Amino acid sequence: MRVGTAEMLMDLGYSVVQAGSGAEALGVLRRGEIEIDMLVSDYLMPGIGGADMVREARKLRPDLPALLITGYTNLVQGPGAELPRLAKPFRQAELASRIAELIDAAQARDNVLTLPDARRSEGR
């Protein structure tokens, strides 16, 4: 799954950093040597699962967009239920669409302009 998904993402023009496990991915984030804009992970992995890996990653980077890829269509409850998902099998166009949605949502959060409360700034 990892290699095929990485190839699809590279074909779409994304730079991809591959990690062989959730622990390795967390190590990449902890070191901070490479700027990571989004995580894409399989739900089931050896060692730490995808949902747990995303939770750990968000302790380091709370707003990091993440996508879980899963063959479990009934993943409505339990670990990862709150995370954006893409069901297997999927096509490159579906992956591209889902990635674009998540990146757009993250950029929208980054571009929110907050203003001081007018009552506070007027001394009330």
Image: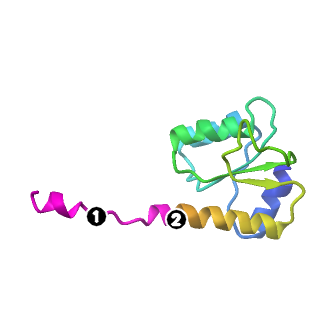
Q: Please, what is the three-letter code of the amino acid marked with disc 2?
A: Gln
Residue at left 74%, top 67%? 96
Tag 1: Cα neighbours inside 10 Å, few (<14), some, or many (≥20)?
Answer: few
Viewer-side residue, 16 vs 77: 77
Does the magenta portion include 8? Answer: no
Query: Which range is magenta?
Result: 107-124
Horizontal and vertical percent for residue 43? 78, 42
Front residue of 113/13: it is 113
Q: Residues within 10 Å of mark 2 (few under 14, many from 20)?
A: few
Q: Is residue 24 visible?
A: no
Q: Which residue is mark 2?
A: 107
Q: Tell whether 74 sits left or right of 110.
A: right
Q: What distance separates the C-alpha of mark 1 from that of mark 2?
A: 19 Å
**Image location (x, y in percent) of residue 60:** 52, 40
Q: Position of residue 103 (x, y in %)?
A: 60, 63
Which numbered disc, 1 or 2, marks the residue closer to the eye? 1
**Residue 119 sits in quarter:** bottom left
Left of 107 or right of it: where is 94? right
Q: Secondary structure at mark 1?
A: loop
Q: Amino acid at mark 1?
A: Leu
Residue under label 1, please give it: 115
| Residue 12 versus residue 57 in the image, above or below | below
Q: Quadrant of the C terminus?
A: bottom left
Image quadrant assignment for residue 117: bottom left
Left or right: 50, with 38 as reference point: right
Q: Is residue 1 visible?
A: yes
Question: Is there CB contact under 8 Å for labels 1 and 2?
Answer: no
> Going by the picture, which residue comes out furthest to the right?
89
Q: Residue shown at 81%/57% (left/top)?
A: 5
